[in-house]
């Protein structure tokens, strides 16, 4: 989306060598202390040079000639307008506003000046004030489609997409602005999360400009966010057919293949993206994560380590590397990385949960309990954490607390048979045979295969008499 435009007509058929010669000569003369012998070029020549500099994006030089024009014609609003455009492109927004204020003091009803001031205010992060000026411009020239289009852009800058859509929709039949309107409507609908309509307008824009790789990329991203991964892949491959070195196409193509569990193809895409931008953290993180999923832990650790060297305050990098260290039995390194991740993000329950699981694995269940409790404190509905917390309490023979944990599991998911099964084990330890029976009936109702687990686990939890009695009841319940 581009806010500032300028007339390029004067530079279309210039003799570029002659123009460069003029620029060198005039700028050299301007730098001389004695300007008595200097003859100013005509306004037409100066304006032509300014437009040429705009076309070449040489805004410092354009500004010099704007000053020359103003020196010749101090009341020229056109010169002040050109000066403001040069200043905006040099990110000198307040100076640009000063130039426009001076021009408007000369001609306060000039709609072109009001339009330019509106967009200069947008660049100066004063979009709300910009609306007043674009409305004023439209009051003097209500049929001006450019101003109307720009008003839509201002609403975009304010993230007021519904209002922007309402304005852009009035320009759908415009000969001049239809294509740009399709682009902006796609942009608005994308940020509203209405990917179907975003896709529609990107497709309409592509009808006008089928070889625009940027449009194909944006359409692919919209498809991807809409979970239409195969269509997205087609779009990104089209981008690569136009430009095989498109980093973003390779990156988003990798994301799509990853979402489809086509992990090998995803790794190939991320590797190609990293050949273009070797230090890109997003591609590096995704590739490291994929290598971890594929069991290539050494390569995953290498990439996570390189990423940490580049961005040591990113907890996800330590988290990812910790998982790889844990998977390769490098428990001390894993624990250090979990601690580093937690120091960077103490309110993430998944980090505390992962650390608890590792502590259990290295036979430190009491330390694990503290981490489980912290994770539950941060996310009271973390059912897996409640379940594993209950298992750890059971192993430590803290049966009353284990009972509370598994009751919470059942409350969170009444249809998960494992919750009833584990609570039945706790009830057995608490000598509540009636409760064991009820819970086992419910567990087996939800998952009949739990009868096999009963036979292997409850033989040591109940007396031989109670075990056989309950087994008979369960088999009868299943009519075996």
Image (spheres, grey):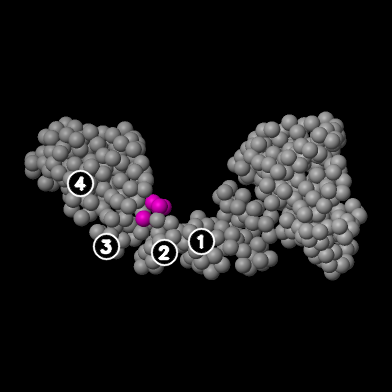
CA distance for labels 3 and 4: 19 Å
At horizontal 89% and vertical 63% (from top left) the residue drawn is: 13
Can the viewer see residue 130 in this picture?
A: yes
CA distance for labels 2 and 3: 18 Å
Q: Residues within 10 Å of mark 2 (few under 14, many from 20)?
A: some
Q: Residues within 10 Å of mark 3 (few under 14, many from 20)?
A: few
Earlier sequence position, callout 3 versus callout 4: 3
Q: Name the mark nearer the viewer: 2 or 3.
A: 2
The reply to whether callout 4 and callout 1 are in contact (CB within 8 Å) is: no
Q: Is residue 370 magenta?
A: no
Residue 93 as seen in the image, left or right of residue 387:
right
Residue 279 lies, in percent from the top left, at 50, 63
CA distance for labels 4 and 1: 37 Å
CA distance for labels 3 and 1: 27 Å
Toward the viewer: 467 or 8?
8
Residue under numbered circle 2: 306
Q: Name the mark nearer the viewer: 3 or 1.
A: 1
Q: Name the mark nearer the viewer: 4 or 1.
A: 1
* Image disc number at residue 280: 1
At horizontal 55% and vertical 60% (from top left) the residue drawn is: 251
Can the viewer see residue 149 in this picture?
A: no
Earlier sequence position, callout 2 versus callout 4: 2
Give the magenta range: 313-318
Residue 373 lies, in percent from the top left, at 26, 39
| Quarter-of-image position of residue 110 | top right
Residue under numbered circle 3: 330
């Amino acid at each position: 989306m581009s806010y500032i435009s300028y007339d390029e007509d004067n530079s279309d058929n210039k003799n570029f060598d002659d123009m460069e010669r003029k620029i060198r000569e005039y700028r050299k003369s301007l730098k001389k202390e004695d300007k008595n012998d200097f003859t100013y070029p005509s306004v037409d020549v100066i304006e032509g040079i300014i437009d040429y500099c705009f076309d070449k994006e040489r805004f410092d030089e354009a500004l010099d000639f704007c000053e020359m024009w103003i020196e010749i014609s101090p009341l020229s609003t056109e010169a002040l307008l050109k000066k403001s455009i040069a200043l905006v492109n040099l990110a000198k927004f307040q100076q640009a506003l000063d130039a426009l204020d001076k021009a408007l003091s000369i001609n306060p009803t000039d709609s072109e000046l009001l339009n330019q001031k509106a967009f200069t205010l947008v660049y100066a992060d004063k979009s709300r004030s910009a609306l007043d000026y674009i409305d004023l411009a439209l009051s003097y020239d209500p049929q001006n489609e450019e101003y109307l289009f720009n008003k839509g852009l201002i609403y975009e800058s304010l993230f007021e997409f519904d209002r922007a859509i309402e304005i852009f929709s009035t320009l759908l039949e415009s000969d001049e602005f239809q294509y740009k309107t399709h682009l902006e409507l796609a942009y608005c609908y994308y940020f509203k999360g209405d990917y179907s309509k975003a896709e529609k307008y990107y497709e309409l824009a592509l009808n006008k400009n089928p070889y625009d790789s940027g449009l194909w990329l944006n359409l692919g991203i919209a498809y991807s966010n809409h979970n239409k991964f195969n269509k997205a892949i087609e779009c990104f491959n089209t981008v690569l057919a136009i430009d095989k070195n498109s980093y973003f196409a390779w990156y988003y193509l990798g994301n799509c293949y990853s979402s489809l569990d086509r992990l090998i193809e995803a790794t190939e895409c991320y590797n190609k993206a990293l050949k273009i931008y070797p230090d890109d953290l997003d591609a590096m993180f995704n590739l490291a994560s994929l290598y971890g999923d594929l069991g290539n832990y050494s390569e995953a650790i290498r990439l996570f380590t390189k990423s940490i060297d580049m961005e040591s305050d990113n907890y996800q990098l330590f988290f990812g590397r910790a998982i790889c260290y844990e998977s390769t039995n490098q428990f001390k390194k894993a624990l250090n990385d979990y601690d580093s991740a937690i120091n960077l993000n103490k309110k993430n329950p998944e980090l505390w949960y992962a650390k608890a699981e590792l502590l259990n694995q290295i036979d430190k269940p009491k330390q694990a309990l503290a981490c489980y409790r912290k994770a539950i404190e941060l996310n009271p509905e973390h059912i897996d954490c409640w379940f594993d917390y209950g298992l750890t309490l059971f192993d430590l023979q803290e049966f009353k607390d284990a009972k509370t944990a598994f009751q919470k599991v059942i409350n969170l998911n009444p249809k998960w048979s494992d919750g009833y099964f584990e609570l039945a084990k706790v009830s057995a330890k608490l000598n509540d045979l009636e409760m064991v029976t009820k819970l086992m009936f419910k567990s087996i109702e939800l998952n009949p295969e739990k009868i096999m687990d009963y036979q292997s686990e409850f033989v040591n939890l109940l007396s031989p008499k109670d075990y056989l009695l309950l087994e008979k009841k369960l088999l009868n319940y299943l009519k075996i």
